[in-house]
Amino acid sequence: MPKTEVNSAPGGSETAPWTLIRGARQLLTLRGSDGPRRGAAMADLNIVSDGAVLIRGGVIAEVGTSRRVENLETARSAREIDATGKVVMPAFVDPDVAIASPCRKHREGHAGETDIRHMSTRRLEGHAAAIAADLTRHGVLTVGAHTLLAPDLQNTHKALKLHQTMQSKPLRIRSVFAPPCTQGKVDAFPHGVSQAWLPAIFRNELSSLIEIAIVPGHIADARAVATAAAAIGFNIRFRLQEAPSAEVLELAYSAGATALLGYVPATSDLTRSLADVGCLNVSLAGDIISGDYISNRSAIDDGNPVAIGSGSHLNAGACLNPQFFLFLACRNLGMTSEEAIVATTYNAACSLHLSHVTGSLAPGKAADICVMDVDNYHELARRAGHNDASIVIRAGRIVYRRANPVLECNPYSD
């Protein structure tokens, strides 16, 4: 699979097979204007009742009512996926995932065995495959995979190579280069990050998105790395360890940041300026669960675009189920069901610069689709302990189908 696959939808051909998803009670297309959704736009799911999606070669060809799409000549011979009575929506996007991470036994072992340097490539790939499978069965098909759990630059390179190996198996991976200082274990960026590592990583197509931690007292270091990264062509996002100061917000604006992870800053002229250039606030589920959050309600009302990620590196047992994030967003962050869905799909894709590929259902985009076993999308945020993804489709191919339970009858009953 080519390295550039993450940035583009699969190409169709004259002989590519057609697939028709039909009969959706609610088809959440999330079609709308380009760029991160803000304000009232975060509440618009652009729903089609009794909807259908026609797919060719992994790309969406048509979206509309079942009656219209089914009557197209090309739909008549298509393979059908029956979504009668269900909700069909874009696959979820998680912008903050650790694919390169230690196995649980390593985390619980001795102090010298708690990072990926002690794992063989085969073991690391096996663990990454298990994480990818868990994400897929919950309907997550695109991730921002960071290198936060790499203890040094050598193992950061190991993690980035793992992302390449795992590309499209089945996740669409946006690899995020996070210099080791983002773990908070050192006070400054390692020597040579700007001078040697950044050009090499970008040139070898290991990553085009860098994450820079804002370490208190070391804003100058972050600014130096951001300046060097921007000159090379990296997209930049910042991870906040505390509520950002005006100096940090000014740095994010000057660097053209795509996202701020962690804290949602209080609304100001600077945050409005950041929103105007497409910078998103990404709230992390781990922070929301622990109660370390600020309500997003005022941020949304003030026109700031919001996304949600798992923050799966925060602890070994982090939840990867985006349906639980919908519940948290509505209960703890004051968001509506519609806003929570946009935050975990389209806006999350925007934070990775992938909204042109995924995050909504429109002709020309990759057919990354979830068939949810509910008859109303509001139920998704109310069923916190459930996984209602019954069929998950990646670029037009079914990568997960939930088996129907077999109920045994009691032969001795009347």
Image (cartoon, grey):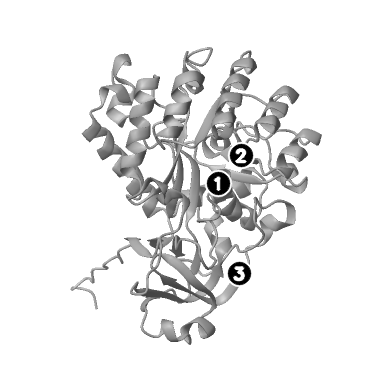
Badge 3 local density, few (<14 within 10 Å), some, or many (20+)? some
Q: CA distance from mark 1 to mark 3?
A: 24 Å
Residue that label 3 marks: 47
- Discs 1/3, front: 1
Residue at 53% x, 42% y: name it. Answer: 309
The earlier-in-sequence mark between 3 and 2 is 3
Q: Please state the horizontal and vertical placement of residue 406, each as a whole percent of the image.
A: 26, 67
Badge 2 local density, few (<14 within 10 Å), some, or many (20+)? many
Q: Please state the horizontal and vertical placement of residue 333, each as a whole percent of the image.
A: 65, 43
| Viewer-side residue, 360 vs 25 | 360
The earlier-in-sequence mark between 1 and 3 is 3
| Viewer-side residue, 225 vs 80 | 225
Residue 268, visible in the rendered structure? no
Q: Examine the image and state in which quarter residue 20 appears.
A: bottom left
**Residue flagged by tag 2: what amino acid is it?**
Thr
Residue that label 1 marks: 353
**Residue flagged by tag 3: what amino acid is it?**
Ile
Residue that label 2 marks: 258
| Viewer-side residue, 327 vs 40 | 40
Q: Are marks 2 and 1 in contact (CB under 8 Å)?
A: yes
Q: CA distance from mark 2 to mark 1?
A: 8 Å
The earlier-in-sequence mark between 2 and 1 is 2
| Element type where label 3 sits in the image | strand
Q: Is residue 282 above or below residue 103?
A: below
Q: Are marks 1 and 3 in contact (CB under 8 Å)?
A: no
Q: Is residue 279 left or right of residue 100?
A: right
Q: Please state the horizontal and vertical placement of residue 386, each as a whole percent of the image.
A: 44, 54
